[in-house]
Structures are given as structure tokens and as C-alpha cells.
Image (cartoon, grey):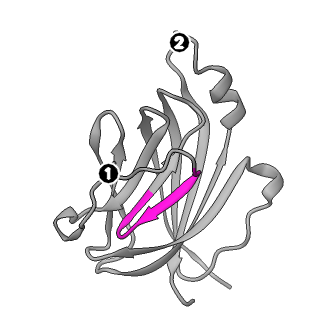
Amino acid sequence: MAQLVRQQQVGVFVGYHAFGLQESDDAVLDLLFPDDFDFGTFLSTHPGRLDITSAGHTHTAALTVEVWDGSPPAQDPAGWEEQAEADFESVSGQVAVWSMSLGRMDDLITLAETGGSWRVRVSSSGRAAVKALAESEENVEAVEHYLVQFWPAGS
């Protein structure tokens, strides 16, 4: 049975319905966030990059990142409005959080001490609620929630 290795919570500033998780050593990447972002897809990928489309235009989403030593238990789809899985390659073992409007944020996510190949599952809730608040003038925080689970590929 897979074990949770680490968990981190981050408030991520969403701008223009988007944010990303990108290999921290971006010098090794050919395409940097947000180039070629696909706004029509909940989760899209580029080498070393995960692009996530939010239901809200401008707000702070709650992001929980988990790193597992094997494939984590499946999430009950009834608790999530969107879910998707993808492959992810990291050279450094560190992932940076990117905002469409603010650029690279200060938070770093540690996957491992070195790089490697990962599988990732992204789940999201609160999408309908944050979409309804999109036109409001109020500061919207932690209405939309994301759970991002990484585990070694092939495990």
C-alpha cells in the first residue's frame, strides 16, 4: 500500500483563469509558462510543466500537494468537479508554482532530492462557486480547491 511522503499547502494566485506547476530549473525547458497555454482544457501538459485552467478569473485558490511513494488511493469522483492525470518529468526534484498574472511565486514544492519521472493526478472542487463569484468585487480566497498528487512513474 502506498504511503504519503509529504504534504504541502499553498495559496495560489489565479489570474486569467490559469496557473501552472513547472520544473523549478526552467533553464532546461524549451517552453516556459504560460507559452502555449490551452485554456480549453482542465489539465494540459508540456515537458516539465502542468497547466491548470481554473473556473474563476482572478482569485486565490487553495492548493494541496501530496507526494506519495506509490500510486495513491483513488479519489472518490463525487467529491470533485474535475479530475485528470498526466506524466511529469522533473530534473531538479523541485516544482515552482506560476501565476498567469504574477509570474513565478515564492513557493517551491519538493518531489524528491533529485529529478525523476512522475505520475500526477489533479482534482478540483469549488469550481461552480468560484465561477459564480467571478464577477464580484470581493476578494475571493480558498473557494476553489485543488489536490495535486505526485507519485513515481511505474510504481
Amino acid type indicated by mark 1: Asp
Q: Residues within 10 Å of mark 1 (few under 14, many from 20)?
A: few
**As rendered, which of 125 and 9 lies closer to the eye?**
125
Amino acid type indicated by mark 2: Glu
Horizontal side, residue 115 vs residue 41: left or right: left
Horizontal side, residue 102 vs residue 64: left or right: left
Q: Which residues are magenta?
A: 41-50
Q: Is residue 34 above or below residue 66?
A: above
**As rendered, which of 125 and 64 lies closer to the eye?**
125
Helix, strand or loop for disc 2: loop
The mark nearer the N terminus, 1 or 2, is: 1
* Residue receiving disc 2: 138
* Rendered-image quadrant of the C terminus: bottom right
Closer to viewer: mark 1 or mark 2? 1
Quarter where residue 135 is shown: top right
Quarter where residue 31 is shown: bottom left
Residue farthest toward the left in the current orientation of the protein = 27
Residue 10 x, y percent position in the rendering: 44, 45
- Report the predominant secondary structure element of the magenta stretch: strand
The answer for how far apart the CA atoms under marks 1 and 2 are is 29 Å
Q: Is residue 47 in the magenta section?
A: yes
Residue 35 x, y percent position in the rendering: 32, 51
Write the residue at 62% across / 80% down: 71
* Residue receiving disc 1: 35
Horizontal side, residue 24 vs residue 75: left or right: left
Residue farthest toward the top in the current orientation of the protein = 137
Write the residue at 59% across / 54% down: 147
Q: Is residue 118 in the magenta section?
A: no
